[in-house]
Image (cartoon, grey):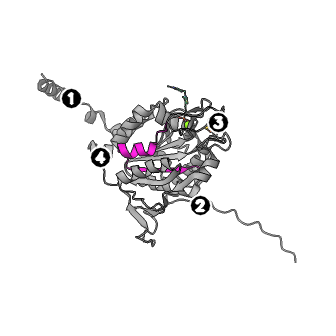
Amino acid sequence: MATTPVAPAPKAPKLNRIGLQILDYRGGKTTLCAGCGHNAISERITEAFFEMGIQPERVMKMSGIGCSSKSPAYFMSRSFSFNSVHGRMPSVATGALLANKTMRSLAVSGDGDTASIGMGQFVHLLRRNVPMIYIVEDNGVYGLTKGQFSATADMGSKQKSGVINDLPAIDICALAIQLGATFVGRSFSGDKKQLSAMLKAALAHQGTVLLDVISPCVTFNDHEGSTKSYKYMQEHEEEVGEVGFVPFFDDISVEYDANTTVDVEMHDGSHLRLRKIHDEYAPTDKVQAVKMLNESHDGGEVLTGVFYVNTQKQDFSTMLNMVDEPLATLPESRTRPGREVLNELMEMHL
Ligand SMILES: Cc1ncc(C[n+]2csc(CCOP(=O)(O)OP(=O)(O)O)c2C)c(N)n1
Ligand code: SF4
Ligand SMILES: [Mg+2]
């Protein structure tokens, strides 16, 4: 007797350690240009938050203005989100975190938003070591306003119209290390493996994480003569060290060679394992990290990897000795001083 073939049962979706599936971390459909590096970064963010098992409702997504700053709409729809004013996101993010330090903060900005109009705010976020992940989707141009050079455009790089940039670039990573960020690295939107490992490690850190991610703008800065194009990155990317990450909920006894690999224990018990490729690589040495970045510019390389990690420095909310309960949920009786206290204060200052 002939048997009717039975259709295979549909595969159950993969669940993460808190029982959610990848769909729970997705956002709206992107409206950015097809092939824009920012879209690939959104994908990596979605995967990293899913794989680390972060509750989307416990995340606040912060951004300024630009194509990059629009991208938080394209991942984690269930999270809180604040699309602020061009260049003014750092102060909004700092305030939001102080109001509720129990939330995870993820900022997505652009090179124009951060290093041009936003520089005045950005440097103060760095020196405070505000506990958040700050991603700069770096394409060397103002994509949203049609491709003018930003402050990260390399000297000598060519605009689509043929105009040459005659100003030196600001290295956001060197600046961040110098000013106080405690986890600093650079990646490339096309380097899936490295960017994923760096994002997961960033989620394990308590302090300011600054990730400068080279993210080509296919519409205005992906031509011959650009130093932020896919082709230029494929030819000039130089990994300073291979980034490995073992989350706290996996087996951390995985073997590694201590002669060639630096192991850093992160705040949540996860391990960042950095295998040296570059001779001078010493990711816990601030001076060495800045020196290496300066030398790489002179050599025309685009260094990527984790350049600097410091798990010892206090983050901003610890430094301020904030109460455990978020300020946002404290009752008025605990936030508003009574008349007696006010009178006492007035006496003291008379
Ligand atoms: C206060 C203010 N100044 C200028 C602008 C115009 N503006 C909008 S986006 C942008 C640049 C965006 O560049 P970037 O941050 O690099 O983002 P991208 O679009 O390249 O991702 C500028 C100058 C604005 N919206 N608000
Ligand atoms: S203009 Fe450039 S930065 Fe903006 S979405 Fe298009 S490719 Fe991306
Ligand atoms: Mg830009």
Residue 67 in magenta stretch: no
The residue wearing badge 4 is 318
- The answer to whether marks 2 and 1 mark residues whose Cβ atoms lie closer than 8 Å is no
Residue drawn where x is 34% and y is 41% of the image: 127
Q: Amino acid at mark 2?
A: Lys
The residue wearing badge 2 is 14
Q: Is residue 250 shown above or below 237?
A: below
View extreme (bottom): residue = 1
The residue wearing badge 3 is 220
Mark 4 residue element: helix
Q: Amino acid at mark 1?
A: Gly
Residue span colored magenta: 168-189
In this view of the protein, which residue sits in the foreground, 305 or 83? 305
Residue drawn where x is 66% and y is 31% of the image: 161
The residue wearing badge 1 is 338
Q: Quadrant of residue 341?
A: top left
Residue mark closest to the camera, 3 vs 1? 3
In primary-sequence order, the first of circles 4 and 2 is: 2
Q: Is residue 21 left or right of residue 202?
A: right
Q: Amino acid at mark 4?
A: Thr
| Residue 133 seen anywhere in this rendered image of the structure | no
Distance between the alpha carbons at the discs numbered 1 and 4: 26 Å
- Image quarter where ligand 3 lies: top right
